[in-house]
Image (cartoon, rainbow, N blue to C red):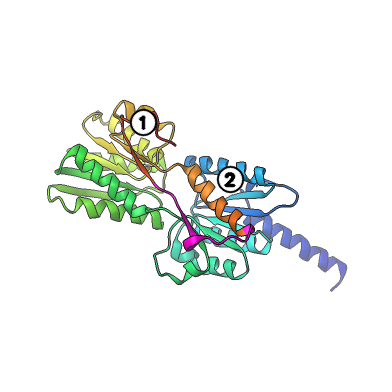
């Protein structure tokens, strides 16, 4: 192979790598471990989580790079493959689709990369012998939210579900939690269940259509506070503020006034920073040769109402 061909090959590889990692950002450091944080999408929740990953990386002298797949399964697969090829020590990942990402995550683990998944694979899945997880009871948080909605609003009326990312395991599990609880009450009718991809504008548009089709709607159950502000806008535009309730989860600082003034009847907190810390702690323990009991760390959740809104973490 002559020199021109070698140079062309090198330039091509550089170009491919830059395309795959378009949008990647983070901090670099000389020495230390390297962490790739591969997101389903970059949003307010993940912005908060990133702050903790950045803080710990700096504290430990590590480097991290954050990559936004834009809700694309294929992009995530490319990013994981490239992270392995570029020698990252650890991959933190929020899969757009657990099943679709499973083969590439197994290959990454087989290549010696520490893989930490944020969306639980079911107990007994063989992949759990190869990767690590930050466990969070996605269905359980949906159950709690629906139970608290019933306590607050009663056992009758039409409700609509505003869910997260289409196809994502966490969004499906939360919806299952809603349905498990609400199905116990014949007087409660689920008139719509829409996946809005954590997007406020999509949630607002969906809510507008639902309110028009069901003017007697009693409530929206939303899977994220930031997304829930979309239905809030639709409710206000329809002149139904105070008539249609909003139950939600995923507590942010911006949610505090909404809880205090009754815009949200409640929310549930599971601070994003806790997830960032848990994932990085697994990486740190692995780097020090420590065992990870159950190959996982767990993050819990707490109901937030007017009574504890000023003290609940976010």
155 lies above or below 290 = above
Residue stretch in magenta: 287-300
Pointer 2 residue: 53
User: Which residue is outermost to the left?
Assistant: 187
Q: Is residue 111 above or below residue 310?
A: below
Tell me which label, 2 or 1, sits earlier in the chain.
2
Q: Say whether residue 297 is magenta.
A: yes
Q: In which quarter of the image is the N terminus?
A: bottom right
Q: Nearer the viewer, residue 25 or 298?
A: 298
Residue 163 locus on image (x, y percent): 34, 49
The reply to whether residue 196 is in sight is: yes
The kind of secondary structure element at disc 2 is helix
- Whether residue 215 is visible here, answered yes or no, is no
Q: Residue at x 65, y 55 (%)?
A: 19
Cα separation, mark 2 vs mark 1, equals 26 Å
Is 143 included in the stretch rendered in magenta? no
Does 193 sit left or right of 138 as displayed? Answer: left
Q: Mark 2 packing: few (<14 Cα in 10 Å), some, or many (20+)?
A: many
Q: Position of residue 131 (x, y in %)?
A: 52, 64
Q: Kindly give the residue lying farthest to the bottom in the view shown.
A: 1
Relative to residue 211, is residue 24 depicted above or below?
below
Which label was assigned to residue 281? none
Q: In this view, does 306 lie above or below 20?
A: above
Q: In which quarter of the image is residue 110?
A: bottom right
- Residue 210 percent coordinates (x, y): 26, 43
What is the total number of numbered labels drawn onto the structure image? Answer: 2
Residue that mark 1 sits on: 309
């Amino acid at each position: 192979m002559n020199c021109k061909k070698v140079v062309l090959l090198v330039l091509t590889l550089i170009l491919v790598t830059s395309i795959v990692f378009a949008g990647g950002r983070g901090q670099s450091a000389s020495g230390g471990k390297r962490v790739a944080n591969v997101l389903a999408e970059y949003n307010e929740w993940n912005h908060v989580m990133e702050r903790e990953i950045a803080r710990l990386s700096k504290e430990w002298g590590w480097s991290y790079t954050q990559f936004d797949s834009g809700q694309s399964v294929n992009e995530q697969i490319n990013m994981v493959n490239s992270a392995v090829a570029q020698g990252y020590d650890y991959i933190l990942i929020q899969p757009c689709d657990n099943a679709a990402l499973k083969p590439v995550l197994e290959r990454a683990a087989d290549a010696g990369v520490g893989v930490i998944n944020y969306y639980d694979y079911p107990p007994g899945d063989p992949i759990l012998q190869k990767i690590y997880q930050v466990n969070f009871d996605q269905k359980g948080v949906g159950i709690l939210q629906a139970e608290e909605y019933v306590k607050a609003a009663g056992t009758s009326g039409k409700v609509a579900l505003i869910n997260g990312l289409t196809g994502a395991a966490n969004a499906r599990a939360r919806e299952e939690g809603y349905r498990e609880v609400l199905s116990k009450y014949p007087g409660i009718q689920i008139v719509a269940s829409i996946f809005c991809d954590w997007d406020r504008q999509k949630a607002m548009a969906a809510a507008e259509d639902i309110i028009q089709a069901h003017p007697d709607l009693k409530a929206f159950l939303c899977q994220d506070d930031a997304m829930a502000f979309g239905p809030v806008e639709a409710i206000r535009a329809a002149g139904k503020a105070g008539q249609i309730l909003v139950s939600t989860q995923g507590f942010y600082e911006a949610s505090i006034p909404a809880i205090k003034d009754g815009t949200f009847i409640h929310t549930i907190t599971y601070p994003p920073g806790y997830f960032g810390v848990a994932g990085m702690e697994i990486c740190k323990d692995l780097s020090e040769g420590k065992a990870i009991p159950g190959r996982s760390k767990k993050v819990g959740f707490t109901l937030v109402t007017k009574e504890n809104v000023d003290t609940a973490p976010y």
